[in-house]
Image: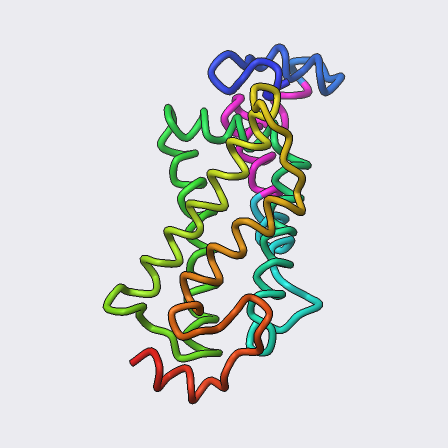
Amino acid sequence: MFARDGYVNARMADVAVEAGLSMGALYRYFENKESVFEHLVADIHEELFTSSRPTTHRFADEPFAALREANLGYLQHYYDNRDVMRTLVEAAAVDPRFREIWWKMRSRHSARFTQAALDDFGIAELEGIDAAIAADAMTCLVEQVAYVWYAHEDIHERAVSLDQAAEVVTRAWHRLFFAPHGWSDSAAPPSSAQATVQRT
């Protein structure tokens, strides 16, 4: 229903019809459409964070492969929930409650990578730029790719597969953090100690 009507135009009456509930029954669970959508987004938020965690490749050993796995997981889950994610962007533009949810959602991803880069490779900055700023820029890249290519895929002139998208954003992310010192996308990284020396 939110996907069809959008956040602004959604009504509790429509929610009740979609859920197969009477208005009275619906109001026993939710106060308004905002609480309905918040409940929906909360589940997707946590699932998105979990889906974008690499499980096959260790970031410390295979940064490119781990990044690609994480990005593909994020993009896949975003794609599966693209209608809700599109509606969240709409809601964030008009409702401070959802702007905060959206901000926390993206900030968690950026902070997780920033901490991993510091823990595994001693990367705190990139040639004078705070690593957190660089990670935030890459988070913006992945998020916008997902939004433009999948949340609005019906108006996109060229279909982009999830594998293609994951490859493109991972190359950009990996090269920003590792390529300045000659680490190719397929090369094994130096040890954490070596990385610390290189980056400080």
Q: Position of residue 56 (x, y in %)?
A: 71, 68
Q: Position of residue 163 (x, y in %)?
A: 67, 47
Tell me which colouring the rendered structure shows: rainbow
Inspect the magenta stretch and tell me whether residue 13 lies in it.
no
In the displayed structure, 76 sits above or below 71; it is above
Residue nearest the observer in this picture, 38 or 23: 38
Instruction: Specify start and end residues of the magenta stretch as a single range.
Output: 25-44
Residue nearest the observer in this picture, 196 or 41: 196
Identify the residue at image location x=50%, y=20%: 7
Q: Quadrant of the C terminus?
A: bottom left
Q: Quadrant of residue 161?
A: top right
Q: Quadrant of residue 66?
A: bottom right
124 to the left or right of 62:
left
Identify the residue at image location x=56%, y=32%: 149
Q: Position of residue 177 (x, y in %)?
A: 41, 66
In the displayed structure, 140 sits above or below 117; it is above
Q: Position of residue 89 (x, y in %)?
A: 46, 30
Q: Residue furthest left?
A: 128
Q: Quadrant of the N terminus?
A: top right
Q: Residue furthest bottom?
A: 193
144 to the left or right of 134:
right
Identify the residue at image location x=66%, y=43%: 162
Identify the residue at image location x=31%, y=68%: 126
Give the number of callouts.
Answer: 0
Inspect the magenta stretch and tell me whether residue 37 lies in it.
yes
Name the dominant secondary structure of the magenta segment.
helix
In the displayed structure, 80 sits above or below 183; it is above
Q: Quadrant of residue 152?
A: top right
